[in-house]
């Protein structure tokens, strides 16, 4: 069965230097990032990892989304990465698209318990979805169907992805 799901890119958090966006499947009330935090916030074993992730996001929000804050994920062709940065010993991963120094699109994630994200079906799906969104956004930005103005992403931000 060849079904498509609608994904909407919407604002998640606004900071002084960076706006964080998230993706949300139209049939869901919560964004993928909200689902991620719902899943990890009350897990005692993850308290330190969540704290590290929160600090990194605050740092990015106040200082800019510099590439050094992201672990590369995806391929060399895309802008998909993972938080927290390489300096962290955390195994908790939140996948994101670093669209610019001012705009980050957050997805979903979880505990990385395998050598690579590709080996974990859920984490792989998180990254693959963001890779598709990245390609769609590049196309829309190049044709002005979507635009970046300072730290705002505007325009046609609905996408249809094969399930």
Image: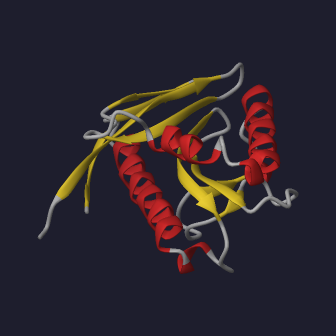
Q: Quadrant of the C terminus?
A: bottom left
Of 111 and 105, the residue lying toward us: 111
Number of numbered discs visible in the structure rendering: 0
User: Which residue extends farthest top?
Assistant: 16
Which quadrant of the structure image shows residue 125? Answer: bottom left
Which quadrant of the structure image shows residue 150? Answer: top right
Q: Is residue 112 left or right of residue 137?
A: right
Relative height, residue 84 to residue 29 (above, below): below
Q: Quadrant of the N terminus?
A: bottom left
* Residue depicted at 80% across the width and 58% down the height: 90
Q: How far across and how far down the image is residue 136, in percent?
A: 36, 51
Q: How is the image coloured?
A: secondary structure
Would you say residue 99 is visible in this rendering?
no
* Residue depicted at 58% across the width and 50% down the height: 96
Relative height, residue 42 to residue 76 (above, below): above
Would you say residue 121 is visible in this rendering?
yes
Q: How far across and how far down the image is residue 139, in percent?
A: 36, 50
Q: Is residue 43 left or right of residue 76?
A: right
* Residue depicted at 59% across the width and 26% down the height: 13
Q: How far across and how far down the image is residue 63, in percent?
A: 80, 30
Q: Is residue 45 left or right of residue 1?
A: right
Q: Is residue 66 left or right of residue 133?
A: right
* Residue depicted at 55% across the width and 80% down the height: 119
């Amino acid at each position: 069965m060849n079904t498509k799901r609608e994904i909407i890119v919407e604002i998640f958090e606004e900071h002084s230097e960076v706006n964080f966006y998230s993706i949300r499947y139209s049939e869901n009330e919560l964004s993928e990032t909200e689902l991620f935090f719902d899943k990890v916030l009350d897990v005692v074993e993850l308290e330190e990892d969540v704290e590290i992730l929160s600090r990194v996001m605050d740092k990015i929000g106040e200082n800019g989304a510099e590439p050094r804050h992201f672990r590369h994920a995806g391929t060399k062709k895309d802008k998909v990465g993972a938080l927290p940065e390489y300096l962290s010993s955390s195994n908790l991963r939140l996948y994101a698209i670093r669209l610019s120094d001012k705009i980050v699109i957050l997805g979903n994630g979880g505990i990385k318990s395998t050598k690579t994200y590709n080996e974990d079906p859920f984490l792989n799906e998180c990254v693959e979805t963001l890779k598709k969104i990245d390609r769609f956004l590049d196309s829309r930005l190049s044709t002005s169907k979507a635009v970046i103005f300072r730290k705002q992403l505007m325009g046609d931000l609905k996408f249809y992805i094969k399930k």
